[in-house]
Image (spheres, helix red, strand yellow):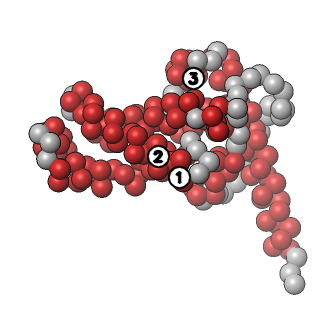
Amino acid sequence: MDHRQLVKDCLRGEISAQKELYNYYAESMLGICYRYTKSMADAEDILQEGFVKVFRFLHQYKSQGELGGWIRQIMVNTAINYLKKNSRYQSDLSFTDSNLHLVSDDDPEKLLSAKELADLIRQLPPGYQTIFNLHAIEGYSHVEIGKILGINEGTSRSQYSRARTLLISWIEKNSSDSKTESYVRP
């Protein structure tokens, strides 16, 4: 697929080009949206809102980077904005420095499938989940996360560390549960 030509066709208002662009990216972008939410319905809402923005601002795409990366950025920003304005997430989207879990530098070497890890990340409280996704998955620095979310850089660091520690403890618990189950035979 020639992305430059596809963008030009979309900008000319060709419905078939817009449909092709949507169909090409929708599945992977839905995965990104789903990482930030607790339900597929919310992820689909974000996806639709994100694609409205993609088509509204497509004229701003400069063809200097990968089109998928540009669309991904819009989806991440749309997801963050959705979390901020949706009352269901607002009460859970706290970025406090409360001492919920001990911070640990342990790094257990456990084998998990990508789906298992994604499922664990989605179980994190929304604040932890958002910061973990932005830093570990999207590659934002804590300074950038602080600006995006309107929080202190240190808060971002501590929330990320706590999310990581919580994930490690879940992985370790999962691993020990699996070992126990493998030794017990009916």
Quarter that holds the C terminus: bottom right
Q: Are marks 1 and 2 in contact (CB under 8 Å)?
A: yes
Image location (x, y in percent) of residue 14:
13, 47
Image location (x, y in percent) of residue 37:
58, 44
Instruction: Give the farthest residue toward the bottom.
Output: 186
Q: Where does label 3 land, which residue?
A: 149
Comparing labels 3 and 2, the label whose residue is closer to the camera: 2
Give the secondary structure at mark 2: helix
Residue depicted at 57% across the width and 23% down the height: 149
Give the secondary structure at mark 1: helix
Q: Nearer the viewer, residue 70 or 20?
A: 20
Q: Where does label 1 land, which residue?
A: 41
What's the CA distance linking mark 1 and mark 3?
23 Å
Image location (x, y in percent) of residue 15:
17, 50
What's the CA distance linking mark 3 and mark 2?
20 Å
Q: Is residue 107 visible?
A: no
Residue depicted at 78% across the width and 58% down the height: 174
Image location (x, y in percent) of residue 121:
65, 46
What's the CA distance linking mark 1 and mark 2?
6 Å
How many other residues sit within 10 Å of disc 3, few (<14), some (14-19) or many (≥20)? some
Q: Amino acid at mark 3?
A: Leu
| Residue 166 location, quadrant | top right
Q: Amino acid at mark 2?
A: Asp
Q: Where does label 2 land, which residue?
A: 45
Give the secondary structure at mark 3: helix
- Above or below residue 175? Residue 124 is above
